Image (cartoon, rainbow, N blue to C red):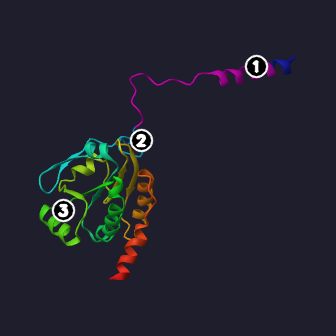
Amino acid sequence: MNRLLVLVSALLFVTSVVFAEEPKPAADSKPAADAKVAKKVDVGTQAPVFKIKDATGKEIDLAELTAKGPVLVRLTCGCSGCDKELAYFQALHESYKDAGLTSLAIFKEPDTKVAAYVKEKKLNMLYAVDTKGEAWNVFETKTMPTNFLIAKGGKIISVAPGCDPSGLLAKTLSEKVAKTVNKDAVDVQKQVAEAKDKK
């Protein structure tokens, strides 16, 4: 009888533990300080509202660009790594501009330095200067460079941070652009290497 009583008591205890409700946090309690805040500018989200003036003072409106087709926004500078990577992004732009891609490079250096750099490199894409780095704040990144591929309509489909002078990052982006514009992918890494060999 004692064994039966002990067994029933144990069963009741286990049942009460299993069905007990977890304590609910108070309505006025704050979330844990270490809880991650979701990024607003990320793959799958809508591109932020962004406007900037080009070298001639004409306003560039990202929403207007994405209404026409996909846009590749490159937040960059003229450092040696970004400089080596530029050829791949110029090749990428040339390969897909007729399919509707707009490439927008945003530089952090002063206007005069960028103007000389653009002339020297024969930059073939839309560009603007942002010495204060406001574009980096809008796009929620501190990485230099960072590339945002945005589909027609404004949805971000790729975020590629970091510098890759080998051209592999640009090649991967080229493949993503190709899918976006329904075109065969161009190997920009190979294209630039072949152009160097001809020189």
Q: Disc 1 or 3, which lies upstream in sequence?
A: 1
- x and y percentages locating residue 178 in the rendered image: 43, 56
- Judged left or right of residue 111, residue 173 is right
Q: Residues within 10 Å of mark 2 (few under 14, many from 20)?
A: few
Q: Which quarter of the figure is the N terminus placed in?
A: top right
- x and y percentages locating residue 16 in the rendered image: 67, 20
Secondary-structure class at tag 2: loop
Residue drawn at x 40%, y 40% is: 38
Q: Which amino acid, mark 1?
A: Ser
Front-most of 29 and 59? 59
Front-most of 127 and 14? 127
18 falls in the magenta region: yes
Q: Which amino acid, mark 3?
A: Glu
Q: Is residue 93 above or below residue 44?
A: below
Q: Disc 3 or 2, which lies upstream in sequence?
A: 2
- Judged left or right of residue 185, residue 110 is left
- x and y percentages locating residue 72 in the rendered image: 33, 54
Q: Which amino acid, mark 2?
A: Lys
**Residue 112, numbered circle:** none
Q: Which quarter of the figure is the C terminus placed in?
A: bottom left
Secondary-structure class at tag 3: loop
Q: Which residues are magenta?
A: 6-32
Query: Which residue position is annotated with label 2?
Result: 36
**Residue 9, numbered circle:** 1
